[in-house]
Amino acid sequence: MGAGAPGNSTEKDPSQWVTGDEPMTGAQKSYLDTLAREAGETLPADLTKAEASEHIDRLQGRTGRGRNS
């Protein structure tokens, strides 16, 4: 089962994060830059942690990165 599998109580929706409104982390920005480049997208540089997480999930689906085979 993946991290987003039904019944997984350890993963919260990013909109429920206490720190979700804080600026994205350096690690999120670096990974997002890579994913966006591979997907041919440009993303704003001022995303919050929650927004960055949602974009990471979406772009992983587009690029196939970060998914178990």
Image (cartoon, rainbow, N blue to C red):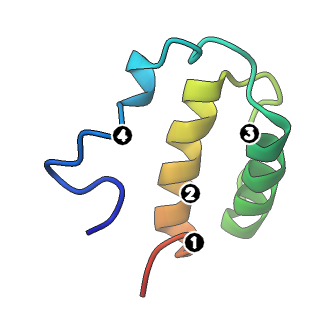
Residue 21 in picture, x, y percent from top left = 61, 11
Q: Earlier in the sequence, mark 3 or mark 1?
A: 3
**Crowdedness near tag 3: few (<14), some (14–19) or many (≥20) residues, C-alpha within 10 Å:** few
* Residue topped by disc 3: 43
Observer-nearest of 65 and 43: 65
The residues bearing labels 3 and 1 have C-alpha atoms spaced at a distance of 15 Å
Compared with residue 47, is residue 28 higher up or lower down, i.e. above or below? below
Q: Residue furthest bottom?
A: 69
Residue at 56% from the left image edge and 39% from the top image edge: 53
- Asked whether the beta carbons under mark 3 and mark 1 sit within 8 Å of each other, the answer is no
The residues bearing labels 3 and 2 have C-alpha atoms spaced at a distance of 11 Å
Q: Earlier in the sequence, mark 4 or mark 3?
A: 4
* Residue topped by disc 4: 11
* Residue topped by disc 2: 59
**Is residue 9 left or right of 47 when viewed as pictured?**
left
Q: Nearer the viewer, mark 4 or mark 1?
A: 4
**Is residue 14 left or right of 60 when viewed as pictured?**
left
Residue 14, located in which quarter of the rendered image?
A: top left
Which three-letter amino acid code belongs to the residue tagged 1? Thr
Q: Nearer the viewer, mark 4 or mark 3?
A: 4
Q: Earlier in the sequence, mark 2 or mark 4?
A: 4
* Residue topped by disc 1: 63
- Asked whether the beta carbons under mark 2 and mark 1 sit within 8 Å of each other, the answer is yes
Residue 48, located in which quarter of the rendered image?
A: top right
The residues bearing labels 4 and 3 have C-alpha atoms spaced at a distance of 24 Å
The residues bearing labels 4 and 1 have C-alpha atoms spaced at a distance of 22 Å
